[in-house]
Amino acid sequence: MFSSQRWTVSRRLPAIVLALSIVPAASSRADVVTDWNRNLWQAVRTGNTNPLFSTRVMAIVQAAVFDAVNGIERRYTPVHVAPAAPRGASRRAAAIEAAYATLKALYPAQSAVLTAQRDASLDSIVDDPEDVESSESIARGIEWGDTVAAAILAWRATDGFSSAPATFTGGTDIGEWRPTPPNFANGVVAGFPTMKPWVMTSFDQFRPGPPPNLASAEYATAFNETRLKGRGIPFGAPNTPPDPDGNPDREVALFWNGNTPGYWNRIAVQVSEARDLSLSENAHLLALLNIAMADAGIACWDAKYYYEKAPLVPPATGLPFRGWRPVTAIVEAASDENAATDPDSAWTPYLMITPAHPEYPSGHSTVSGAASAVLAARFGDQTSFTIDSELRPGHDRQYDSFSAALADIHNARVFGGIHFRFACLRGSAVGALIAEYVLGNALQRVHGH
């Protein structure tokens, strides 16, 4: 069993031992980077972390893992920590320790489980007959992983995130967001609308154009699609089976109503392992993926609260859409000045619980737009994979492309009754732009490597 005392660094180890300790591992060997991505997802689920906050958590952990590995290999520009690993440090030990240290700081209640996972991971290095590493190398990797984790955590501690309870209550103007039934929860903000980005130059760099006004044909089309496809049972009624009539629309709404970055990390790891990516390639891919999703979350929340609070447009253009959710818009449609939208006072969304924040743009779609673009750039869009859902165990879905999964996510939010289609389409377009920017400006290969 691993013991921290086992890795006391000895400066007198022969040079030949240190040289052997940094021989690259075979690509067929189990990869600690993907192993710890799975541990990350387990910690997020155990902590019941909401999808928005998960984008930040996962970016922190994968940034630390990347900078720890890159600090030894020095192949790319770093996320934040300049490459300065001690000579001969173990890449695997550094990746393990960076993931462990960040997760332990973010989820202190899970310390015992995380420590057991760390010990098992470090033991696997010692017991690997195909890639033997010395105690000196492992100790130096642990030391470097801790250094990187501390630096990443300190950096993001000043990013503007807050775990304080939400206090935003919106307003009662036509088109304006307000708390929705049945819980009437305050709007989730947590500093995201103005958070320090990871790669973007500012939180509003990719702010989308305004949503359609309430008098427009585009609004009426989207309104009527959600009204028809997203209807649920009355609030307070006994819940019904998820697919009582064999309706695939309801099945897809339930399937994709989980933790957004969790889906895309599982997809990335599955495709990576099928393509036999190396430890270094996985660290690079998962950092880019999660940083792009984190910046997409920041951009989305900026837009949500910017348009919810934006100045009113001149009356001649029609009433502005200011983020009200379908459960509000459909019940109060008599006031929207659009003859093509009919009110329904008994309408409820199929997913029952509407997310507590303004409707435009869709957070799931924005983050997923970034994720699908990163994976398409790395593997090609026409990549097949199967994905599971924490909300629909045993109902895995198979896709032939990342864009097909993204289209299903758009449908899921509409068929769930919690979004209008324009919020999904424009959100994912913003996410794709952010992914392109991240891929072109972060973690770039250093000349000569």
Image: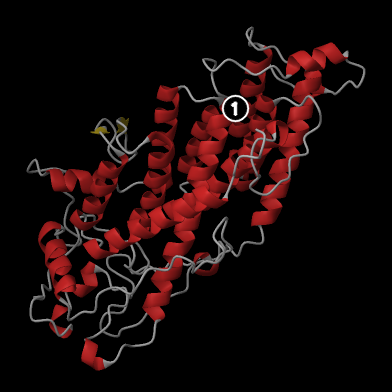
The residue positioned farthest toward the top in the image shown: 129
Kindly give the residue lying farthest to the front in the view shown: 448
Say which quadrant the C terminus sits in. top right
Residue plotted at (25% across, 64% down) = 422
Residue in front for this viewpoint, 13 or 9: 13
The image shows residue 22, relative to residue 157, as above or below, that is above
Instruction: Please tell me how many numbered marks the rendered image carries.
Output: 1
> What is the x, y in percent for residue 443?
59, 44
The correct choice, above or below, for 205 with respect to 99 in the image is below
Residue found at x 41% / y 41%: 377
Q: Is residue 434 left or right of residue 75?
A: left
- x and y, in percent, of residue 5 in the image: 81, 23
Rendered location of residue 103, percent (x, y): 61, 41
- Outermost residue, right side: 12
Disc 1 crowd, CA 10 A, few/some/many (<14, 14-19, 20+)? some
Decide: is 156 above or below 16: below
Residue at x 25% of width, y 32% of height: 398
State the colouring used for the structure image: secondary structure
In this picture, residue 134 sits left or right of residue 223: right
Q: Nearer the viewer, residue 276 or 99?
A: 276
Compared across the picture, whether 210 is left or right of 27 comes to left
Splitting the image into 4 quarters, where does residue 359 fall? bottom left
Residue on which disc 1 sits: 117
Judge by depth and name the residue closer to the eye, 174 or 49. 174
Q: Quadrant of the N terminus?
A: top right
Q: Is residue 55 visible?
A: no
Q: Could you tell me which secondary element the residue under label 1 belongs to?
A: helix
| Residue 32 visible to an observer of this rendering | yes
Amino acid type, callout 1: Gln
